[in-house]
Image (cartoon, rainbow, N blue to C red):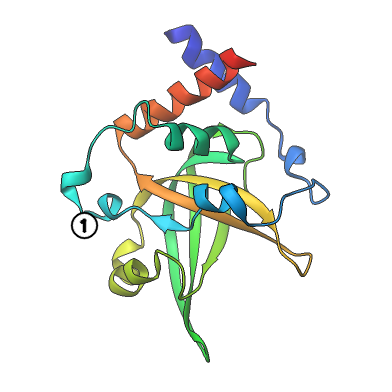
Amino acid sequence: MRWIAGFILVTSAACSPSATGPNRPVPAYGGHAADLFDDTIEARAVGLDPEAAGSVRGDPVFRERVQLGDATLRVRIDTVTTKQEDSGASYQIGFRVIETLAAVHPPPESFTVKIDKTSPSAGILKSYESALVGKRFIAFVRLFGRADGDREYHFHLSSDSKDVAASVREATVLENLQK
């Protein structure tokens, strides 16, 4: 098992920042990828649904997020900013990468995502805005292109637990074995 962990670390370290260059083609946000990177903060990750704290090991959607994402990271929320707009409140979440668990195209050490009022996480952000600052999560992230030509990260946040981190590593090993 140690050699597998070493292989993963070497593989992750070999991904240079230049691989995330500005000219890398990225898909438009939509379809199945939008279902995987759905801008959701899982309720159990903020303690709202402790009954749902089951294992993610073997979950095909979880494995697909790891394998199709640009990166799976242990992150800390540094900032949550609310912006009042005519259409309602939107939020910006500032993340800091604590540890890279799996990455093909990792984001910078600090990155921001924007959440609008239609996001599944809008209610959690509205209720727990300041309480989320400093909280740690496992983030599944992927960069997408917008219609205006700009790019933005979309994500899915899970609880920062040993079980989730171990399942990320397992999904990465399975992906490498399938290649």
Q: Residue furthest left?
A: 51
The quarter of the picture where residue 69 lies is top right
The answer to whether residue 150 is left or right of residue 11 is right
Q: Residue furthest right?
A: 23
* Position of 39 relative to 52 (above/below): below
Give the residue drawn at x 27%, y 32%.
55
Q: Mark 1 packing: few (<14 Cα in 10 Å), some, or many (20+)?
A: few
Residues 142 and 81: in front is 142
Give the residue drawn at x 51%, y 35%.
64
Picture coordinates of residue 46 (x, y %)?
27, 55
User: So how many labels did they put on this image?
Assistant: 1
The quarter of the picture where residue 125 lies is bottom left
Task: Answer whether residue 99 is visible to the viewer in this image.
Answer: yes
Locate the N terminus and report the quarter of the image it occupies.
Answer: top left
The quarter of the picture where residue 161 lies is top left
Picture coordinates of residue 138 (x, y %)?
41, 43
Picture coordinates of residue 86 (x, y %)?
53, 92
Give the residue drawn at x 62%, y 56%.
30
* Position of 156 relative to 178 (above/below): below
Q: Residue furthest front?
A: 31
Picture coordinates of residue 152 (x, y %)?
65, 60
Dot 1: element: loop
Locate the C terminus and report the quarter of the image it occupies.
Answer: top right
Residue holding disc 1: 48
**Which residue type does callout 1 highlight?**
Leu
The answer to whether residue 90 is left or right of residue 53 is right
* Position of 86 relative to 9 (above/below): below
The answer to whether residue 162 is left or right of residue 106 is left
Residues 140 and 30: in front is 30
Residues 118 and 76: in front is 118
Task: Answer whether residue 109 is visible to the viewer in this image.
Answer: no
